[in-house]
Image: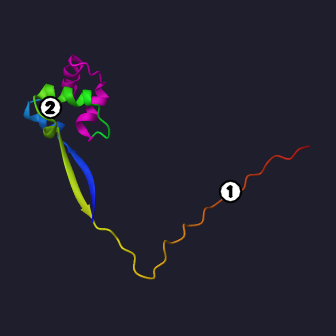
Amino acid sequence: MTKKLGCRWHLRNVMAEHDMFATTDLVPLLAERGVHLSREQVYRLVTKTPQRLSLETLAALCDIFDVGVEDLIEVAVTEEPVHKKAPGSHAAAPPPPVRRNTIRLPRRL
């Protein structure tokens, strides 16, 4: 088994616990703490799990809602089975053939 790490982002739930349901309400609160994000960026921050997040933004969110990092981010570990090859099987199937286009160059006159 191999472990695959992921995370669950709980910002929307934390906002709801603090009776904040509009993502635009978060823009001025972040700006007060020196984090200047557009409405679109804040919307994506709330509705999707961020792939990258600055520590400054994370610290501002923790300060706004008076929560710890563990309240916003939950680490999720899943185990995936390792597929073993049968004895005597070939290493890997050859890749499919690549279709090549011929390029015609102009003739010199």
Stretch in magenta:
22-49
Q: Identity of the amino acid at label 2?
A: Phe
Q: Choose top left, top right, bottom left or bottom right for residue 74.
A: top left
Q: Please count the marks in the image.
A: 2
What's the magenta bit mostly, secondary-structure-wise? helix
Q: Choose top left, top right, bottom left or bottom right for residue 81.
A: bottom left
Furthest toward the bottom, the residue is: 88
The residue indicated by pointer 1 is 101
Tell me: residue 11, above or below residue 36.
below
Q: How is the image coloured?
A: rainbow
Q: Earlier in the sequence, mark 1 or mark 2?
A: 2
Mark 1 surroundings within 10 Å by alpha-carbon count, few (fewer than 14), some (14 through 19), many (20 or more):
few
The residue indicated by pointer 2 is 21
Q: Is residue 108 left or right of residue 49?
A: right
Position in image of residue 86 (x %, y %): 39, 80
Q: Is residue 9 magenta?
A: no
Q: Identity of the amino acid at label 1?
A: Asn
Tell me: residue 81, above or below residue 13.
below
Position in image of residue 75 (x %, y %): 20, 48
Tell me: residue 22, above or below residue 36.
below
Position in image of residue 29 (x %, y %): 19, 21
Which secondary structure, mark 2? Answer: loop
